[in-house]
Image (spheres, grey):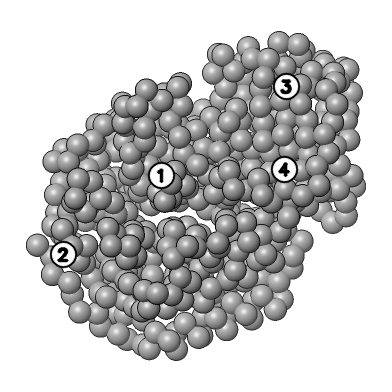
Amino acid sequence: MNELLTPHEFTNHDAALAKAEQGVANLASVRNNRWYPRFHIASNGGWINDPNGLCYYGGRWHVFYQLHPYGTQWGPMHWGHVSSEDMLHWQREPIAFAPSLEEERNGVFSGSAIVDEHGDVRFFYTGHRWANGTDNTGGEWQVQMLATPENPNDAHLQRLTKRGVVVDCPREQVHWHFRDPKVWNTDGTWYMTFGVSSADQRGQMWLYTSTDLEHWSFDRVLFEHPDPNVFMLECPDFFPVTAPDGSQKWVIGFSAMGAKADGFMNRNTNNAGYMIGTWNPGESFQPETEFRLWDWGHNFYAPQSFTAPDGRQIMYGWMSPFVQPIPMENDGWCGQLTLAREITLGEDGDLHTTPMRELEGLRGSTKDFDNSTLGVNEELLIADTATATELEIEFDLTQSTAERISLHVHETQDGSFTNVAFDAQMGRIVLDRVANARGDKGYRAAPLDAAELQSSHLRLRVFVDRGSVEVYVNDGHQVLSSYSLPSSGPRAIRLIAESGTATINRLVRHELKSIGLE
C-alpha cells in the first residue's frame, strides 16, 4: 500500500502563483478580441488545454483547466480556475496551481476533483518531470498527487494546499506516460483510474483502490486498448449511466494516442471517444460497443466529466488547436473549452451529449422564422452579422431534394465562411472549412443512421461564438466542434438549398449573452 509521500518544494508556491498571474496579465494587456469567446470559457491570456478538477462545491460550479501563463503555445502547465453560481455568469479565480514541488517541477498536469461523503473536496492531479531534467528526449516521470482546500469554508476555493504524492510511478512497468487521475466511489470503496503507456507501449487504464483517499493500492489493469498502435490513453474517464429501462451500464472514455485515421474516423491528431459496457468491482471493464467519438469536429480533445448534485453527468472538452496555422497564437490567448454537456444513454443504446440545460438562460433576443421551403439554390439570410448566436433548426428530409442544405456561418465580405451542411449524398452532417480565410481548413462529417436519414425531423442546434462553432445533431446524438476564425467586418449567417429544395419545419435564432469572462 502506498504511503502519502512528503512533498519536496523547490520554490515558494505563493511566489510562483504571483509570477504566473503577472504572466497572464501581461498577455491579457495585448489581447486581441476578434475571436475571443463570449460564451465559452477561456483564459484571460496565455494557452489553455484540458479541463480539470470539475466539481460543484460550496454552492458554486468550479472549472479548472491546464494553463501556460507565459505564452500562447503549450508550456509548463499550471491550473487556471473559474467559478459560477448558475453556470451562466462566471468569474475568474486566482490561479490554483503552479509548479513548486520537485515531483511536478516541469508541470502540474491534468486531474479531477471528488467531493467525499462528508462534503469535503479533494483534488487529484499528475506531477510531471522530465526524466533527464531537461526535455522529453529522456522520457517522462509522472506521479499522482493530492491537494485539498486551505480553507474548506471558502466556496470559491481560492487557495489549495498540495499534500504530496499518493501514487508513485513504477517506472520499470511504464513507458513514460502515467497520468490524469479520475476518482469515484462505488459501494463504499474509492477507485482511481489513470492513463498508462505500459512497458511494451500499449495504451492502458490502471485501477487503484483506497478507503481514505490518501493511501492507494494497485488493483488491476482496468482496460487495455485492443489496437496495438494506441500507445497511451490520455485523460481517462469512467462512470455509470442508466438506460431508459433502468438498467446500468458503464462508460469508459479516453483520448487514444496513436489511433490511425480510417475513413471518417480518427481524422484529428489524437481522438477522444468512449465505449459502453459493463464493470463490477474486482473485474476489468468489458466493452460492448466499438470505440465511438465524443465529437466529430476538428477541435475536440481531453474531455472530463463529473456528477452534478442532481445526478446529471456533465462534461467539458477542450477545443484543441493542434494543427498549424493557429492565428490565435498572435492574439495573446489560445484555446477554449466547449460548452458544458449533459451525458445520457438514449433508447437507441448510444450516448447523447446535449448542452447543459442551464445554458438556455444565456438567451436574449429571439427571432422565429416562418416555416418555409427554399427553392432550388434559394438562399435565406438569417442574420446580417452575429458574434454570439444559437440556432435551432429542423428540416424535413422526406420533403427536401437538395444535395446539400448548407448553413453558412461567419460569412464575411471577402467571401470566406464555414459551412454546416446536411449532405444527402454522403448521408452525414458536414462541417466544412474549405472557404475559411484563416487557420486550418478541411472538413469533418458526423454520421446519421438509417432512421435519421429518412426523418421528417432532422434537428440541429448550432452555437456560433466569435471564433468557434458547435453543432449538436438530433438531441446530441452526434456533435461537431471546430474553430472558425472569420475575417474582419460583419459575420452573416445564411441558409442555402444547393441543387434542390429544402423544407424547414422550424428555424429560431437566439442572441446569446456574455458569460462575463471577456
Look at the numbered disc 3 and give the secondary structure of its residue: strand
Mark 3 nearby-residue class (10 Å; few <14, some 14–19, many ≥20): many
**Amino acid beneath label 2:** His
Q: Residue at x 43, y 30 (%)?
A: 345
Q: CA distance from mark 2 to mark 3?
A: 55 Å
Task: Point out the image quarter for the C terminus.
Answer: bottom right
452 to the left or right of 242: right
Q: CA distance from mark 3 to mark 1?
A: 33 Å
Residue closer to the observer: 3 or 347 = 347
Q: CA distance from mark 4 to mark 3?
A: 16 Å
**Amino acid beneath label 3:** Phe
The location of residue 458, given as percent across then percent down, is 66, 22
Mark 4 nearby-residue class (10 Å; few <14, some 14–19, many ≥20): many
Which badge, 2 or 4, comes first in the chain's sequence? Answer: 2
Which badge, 3 or 1, comes first in the chain's sequence? Answer: 1
Point out which mark residue 390 bears.
4
Point out which mark residue 215 bears.
2
Q: CA distance from mark 1 to mark 2?
A: 27 Å
Q: Are marks 1 and 2 in contact (CB under 8 Å)?
A: no
Q: Which residue is mark 3?
A: 395
